[in-house]
Amino acid sequence: SYRKGGYHAVRVADHFAAGRYIAQRKLGWGQFSTVWLAYDTRTSSYVALKIQKSAAEFVQAAIHEINVLSSIADGDPSNSKYVVQLIDHFKHTGPNGQHLCMVLEFLGDSLLRLVKYNHYKGLPLNKVREICKCTLIGLDYLHRELGIIHTDLKPENILLFSTIDPAKDPLRSGQSPILERPEGNLNGGVSSLIEKRLKRRAKRAVAKISLRRDSMGGIVEAPKSGRNIDGIDVRCKIVDFGNACFADKPLAEEIQTRQYRAPEVILKAGYSFSVDMWSFACIAFELATGDMLFTPKGGGHGFSEDEDHLALMMELLGKMPRKIAIAGAQSKEFFDRHGDLKRIRRLKYLPLDKLLIDRYKFSEKDAHEFSQFLLPLLDFVPEKRPTAQQCLQHPWLNCKESTPNEMRNESSVEKVNIGMSNLKIKVGK
Ligand code: ATP
Ligand code: MG
Ligand code: MG
């Protein structure tokens, strides 16, 4: 992909935007871009530099993402809405073409990594509550104030961040950013040695940031159990607006990552802000249990992944109202005229609170309260789902005590692939 139209190859200490930003270390990459930690010489702070591939379609996508991110930043000058802030953007010309670059505030690990670090055991419910609150404030801002639907909400797209002011952070100000590459044309041996040294320095600089985050809002290494993350002040921000759209200008018909996809998207019945609320509920469940809520499997069983997905939803939430089931452009693909699935005939209903108690060893009280929070968000009727604003008022977000997480985790929770689909009998066509 490092060819014409593709990624821009970056080396440690490369300069961008007439020397304002200096590359330190690669943070990640995606379909569209590579993302680098960079030092901003103007503000003496670290930023994330997202360098888009250069082909026309990627330029188009970056322009869209910059538009969305600009409205987000314009509406939130104090940066208090739990959504990533765009700091700057510019063009950078390299051997592979002209690349649009976005300068974003530098954030930490994703919730996906947090769940992994916790050995897929589920976070303590108080942590889940904190993450839910930040995410909902972010969603409320996007939905109600800006009219933006994220359309790809998932644990990967929510990043932890530190609440400490970098200017007052002694560790941060004490560390030295990499500012320069060696001058001139050094021969291979020497230059690669210097390169190695620079890379080591870049790694150390970032290690210090992570270490700092460890006590102040992030994580640095895998805690052994749910208990170990108890002391962390958990804050997070919504990122990745490459697929976001303004509600009055939907971009694509097929949106969302499979496991977080709302039923109306599968049925192609149109969508609005409430698709993000569905994904939000899936994320909250995953944080609390370590397992995805829905993991449909497709192919080879006489039914499609879509139909399995709908079956899983109905096994948890009950039968989809007929009116909703038959209302989408794809409805006939899956449902008969009675509103029953065509190929998966026998469903085994397992309500959410029972699932939480039986499989995840929640106390009855926790299971009941958490279900009452999640179930309205998983309403098959999109208009009935609470808005982010309404959800923020829910008592579950403000209840204090819950069964200590380790009591749940130490009980023998069966982690093997016993997806809910094992509970039903599927009948081929
Ligand atoms: P995708 O294929 O998911 O659309 P993309 O090319 O649009 O990818 P992003 O998902 O925005 O790229 O970013 C790629 C990775 O870079 C992220 O998964 C994350 O690890 C890292 N990253 C992105 N933004 C930041 C940030 N602000 N701070 C720290 N790391 C970041
Ligand atoms: Mg992404
Ligand atoms: Mg993207």
Image (tube, helix red, strand yellow):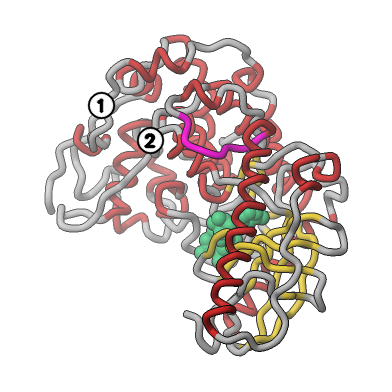
Residue 216's spot in the image, x, y percent?
A: 69, 33
Q: In this view, does 176 lie above or below 23?
A: above
Q: Does the magenta stretch include residue 80?
A: no
The quadrant of the picture occupied by the C terminus is bottom left
Q: Position of residue 177 (x, y in %)?
A: 74, 59
Decide if residue 415 is on the left or right side of residue 380: left
Q: Can residue 63 be seen in this view?
A: no
Residue drawn at x 22%, y 49% as measured from the top left: 342
Reading the chain from its start, which is encountered first: label 2 or label 1?
A: 2
Mark number for residue 291? Answer: 2
Q: Can residue 168 be seen in this view?
A: yes
Residue that carries the numbered disc 1 in the rendered image: 414
Q: Which residue is drawn at 41% across and 54% down?
A: 266
The quarter holding residue 383 reads top right
Label 2 – label 1 distance at C-alpha? 11 Å
Q: Which amino acid type is marked by label 2?
A: Asp
219 within the magenta span: yes
Residue 298, position as x, y percentages in the image = 25, 54
